[in-house]
Image (spheres, grey):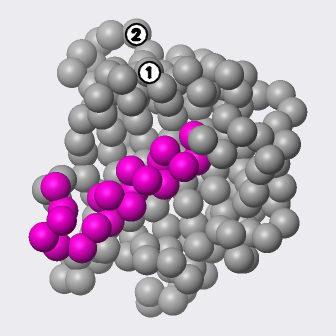
Amino acid sequence: MKSIAAAGLLLILAAGKAWPLQVPALQEEAPNSPAVATVTFTMSLWKQNPPYYSLAISSMGSATYWAILDSDPRTGAPDVREFPVSATRASQIFRLIRQLNFFSGNLKISQSGAARLGSKSFTFASGPVSNQIVYAATKNRQLKQLTALFQNMAATLEAPEPGRMIPRR
């Protein structure tokens, strides 16, 4: 059963489509406020641990991490954690996104090497605006920097016990 689900997930990711259950949901303090800008990074590489994760960060500094490998073995539930991101880090992330024209336009990205490098995507959403890029590699300096920020946050969250600083819910 798990291999069928993994194959389906791989097929969906390979097609560059997002599966609704894979995108972590952010809950803001003010649900009636105007739309909050959110960026979601996803990474899939079946040779790594976890083979798939997603990290969403809002401009207000709330974040949600979602991974499939660290799921609860009894229920199959994914590893989901919510945590705050500092105002400085959120500003840095959204400044890079602005420099990348909110992922619209022509960025120097490549799909080749996805089997070796993994498939990565960024999605920016704010109100009616939603832009996504899917790539394996890039020569764009800002995109490399943004990717590294998200991968480093995920690596911190994936640290083995007792280094885990963010409790699981």
Does 65 sit above or below residue 114?
above
Q: In the image, 60: left or right of 1?
A: left
What residue does disc 2 label? 34
At horizontal 67% and vertical 35% (from top left) the residue drawn is: 142
Query: Neighbour class for label 2 at 10 Å: few (<14), some, many (≥20)?
Result: few
Relative to 154, say whether 104 is above or below: above
Question: Which residue is located at x 39 percent, y 30 percent?
Answer: 89
The label number, if any, that marks residue 47 in the structure image: none
Segment tinted magenta in the rendering: 146-165
Q: Amino acid at mark 2?
A: Pro
Q: Amino acid at mark 1?
A: Ser
The quadrant in which the N terminus is found is: bottom left
Which residue position is annotated with label 1?
Answer: 91
Task: Give me the residue at 77% from left, 50% from top.
Answer: 138
* Whole-percent x, y for residue 11 in the image: 68, 72
**Residue 125 percent across, percent down from the top left:** 55, 28
Quarter of the image holding residue 99? Answer: top right
Residue 3 visible at all: yes
Which quadrant, please, contains the C terminus?
Answer: bottom left
Residue drawn at point x = 48 percent, y = 26 percent: 92
Residue 31 screen position, x and y as percent: 27, 19
Which badge, 1 or 2, is on the more N-terminal residue?
A: 2
Residue 161 belongs to the span the image colors magenta: yes
Dot 1: few (<14), some (14–19), or many (≥20) neighbours within 10 Å?
some
Type of secondary structure dominating the magenta stretch = helix
Secondary structure state at the residue bearing disc 2 = loop
Mark 1–mark 2 Cα distance, whole angstroms, equals 19 Å
**Circle 1 or circle 2, nearest the eye:** 1
From the viewer's perspective, tell me whether residue 155 is left or right of residue 28.
right
